[in-house]
């Protein structure tokens, strides 16, 4: 999220403007939720399945044999 996107979100949820941006209590909560919803969830890597590892092993063995080693 860029600084400009954060500032745009702040202005979307602000309740008053003067020499500073002011938020109501609900505005702060809405802003925090908007930022949270904007940021994608961190994807947890899945360990490779047993069959994936097995195929990887077989392919590497085939390459090794084909190379004549």
Image: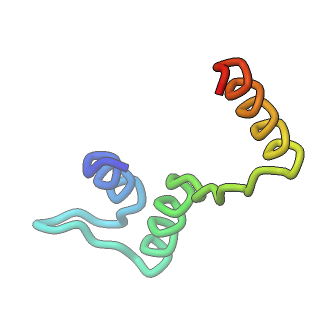
Residue 58 quadrant: top right
Q: Is residue 9 above or below residue 69?
A: below
Q: Residue furthest bottom?
A: 25
Q: Is residue 59 above or below residue 9?
A: above
Q: Residue furthest right?
A: 51
Figure coloring: rainbow
Q: At 76% across and 51% down in the image, what residue appears?
A: 48
On the image, the x and y values in percent for residue 53 come to 79, 46
Left or right for 62, reference 67: right
Left or right for 62, reference 5: right
Q: At 54% across and 66% down in the image, what residue appears?
A: 33
Residue 64 quadrant: top right
On the image, the x and y values in percent for residue 16 come to 29, 66
Q: At 23% across and 63% down in the image, what residue appears?
A: 17
On the image, the x and y values in percent for residue 4 come to 26, 46
Residue 57 quadrant: top right
């Amino acid at each position: 999220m860029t600084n400009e996107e954060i500032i745009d979100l702040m202005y979307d949820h602000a309740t008053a403007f003067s020499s500073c941006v002011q938020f109501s209590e609900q505005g702060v909560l809405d802003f925090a939720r908007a930022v949270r919803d904007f940021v994608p969830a961190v994807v947890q890597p899945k360990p490779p399945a047993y069959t994936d590892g097995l195929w990887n092993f077989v392919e590497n063995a085939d390459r090794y044999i084909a190379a004549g080693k």
